């Protein structure tokens, strides 16, 4: 039996506590489920799914002892996050340069119990539930109309979550706001 060049089998076997049958199953399952990694990435419906696919790939590669592959996947994951973060900064710069795309529809208010806010939170909740990127636009509009809201801890958390397109965290923050 030849020694694999790109898999540290000693490391993989150690992770399986020396259970060779288990390790062979892991290798077989990796080959079966990850051979089409590029197609899985291409078919990812959203950012979170793509990141989960990369993260899973990275972890599975590490588990079987494919250290260089796991490290490459970690770089891909970090590069994707950095790219998406930088994209958000560029989009904010574009918005600031061009001015707001949507004019404020109401005078500035600062109270969470303002009569127009519940309908805005409901609209935002629906967008977040569907992982719709327009949720960020709606929150920006709300914050233009009620800028003091950003001082609220949960509103700030909501803003940060939507900046990262983390719809799970955004939903949690919005629940606290609507409570």
Image (cartoon, helix red, strand yellow):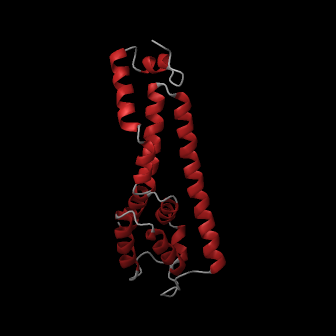
Q: Residue at x 54, y 78 (%)?
A: 144
Q: Residue at x 51, y 81 (%)?
A: 145
Question: Is residue 52 at all visible to an observer of this figure?
Answer: no
Seen from the viewer's position, the closer of residues 81 and 103 is: 81
Query: Where is residue 90 shown, x and y percent of the image?
Result: 63, 66
Report the number of numbered marks.
0
Seen from the viewer's position, the closer of residues 73 and 31 is: 31
Q: As displayed, is residue 128 above or below residue 120?
A: above
Looking at this view, name the residue that lies furthest to the right.
97
Seen from the viewer's position, the closer of residues 145 and 112 is: 145
Question: Is residue 177 at all visible to an observer of this figure?
Answer: yes
In the visual, does 76 lie left or right of 57? right
Looking at this view, name the residue that lies furthest to the top.
1
Q: As displayed, is residue 30 above or below residue 79?
A: above
Which quadrant of the figure has residue 20? top left
Query: Where is residue 136 shown, x and y percent of the image?
Result: 48, 69
Looking at this view, name the residue that lies furthest to the front.
2
In the visual, does 145 lie left or right of 32? right
Query: Where is residue 68 shown, x and y percent of the image?
Result: 56, 30
Q: Residue at x 43, y 42 (%)?
A: 37
Q: As displayed, is residue 56 above or below residue 111?
A: above
Which quadrant of the figure has residue 30? top left
Query: Where is residue 120 shown, x and y percent of the image?
Result: 40, 77
Q: Looking at the rendering, in which quadrant would you find the C terminus? A: bottom left
Q: Looking at the rendering, in which quadrant would you find the N terminus? A: top left
């Amino acid at each position: 039996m030849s020694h694999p060049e790109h898999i540290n089998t000693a490391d993989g076997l150690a992770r399986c506590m020396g259970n060779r049958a288990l390790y062979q199953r892991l290798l077989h399952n990796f080959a079966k489920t990850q051979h089409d990694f590029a197609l899985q990435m291409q078919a990812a419906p959203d950012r979170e799914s793509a990141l989960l696919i990369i993260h899973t790939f990275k972890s599975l590669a590490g588990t079987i002892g494919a250290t260089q592959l796991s490290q490459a996947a970690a770089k891909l994951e970090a590069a994707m996050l950095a790219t998406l973060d930088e994209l958000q900064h560029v989009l904010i710069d574009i918005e600031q340069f061009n001015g707001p795309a949507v004019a404020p529809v109401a005078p500035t208010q600062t109270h969470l119990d303002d009569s127009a806010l519940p309908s805005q939170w409901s609209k935002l909740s629906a967008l977040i539930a569907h992982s719709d990127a327009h949720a960020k636009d709606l929150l920006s509009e709300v914050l233009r109309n009620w800028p003091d809201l950003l001082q609220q801890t949960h509103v700030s958390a909501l803003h940060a979550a939507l900046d990262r397109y983390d719809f799970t965290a955004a939903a949690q923050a919005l629940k606290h706001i609507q409570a």
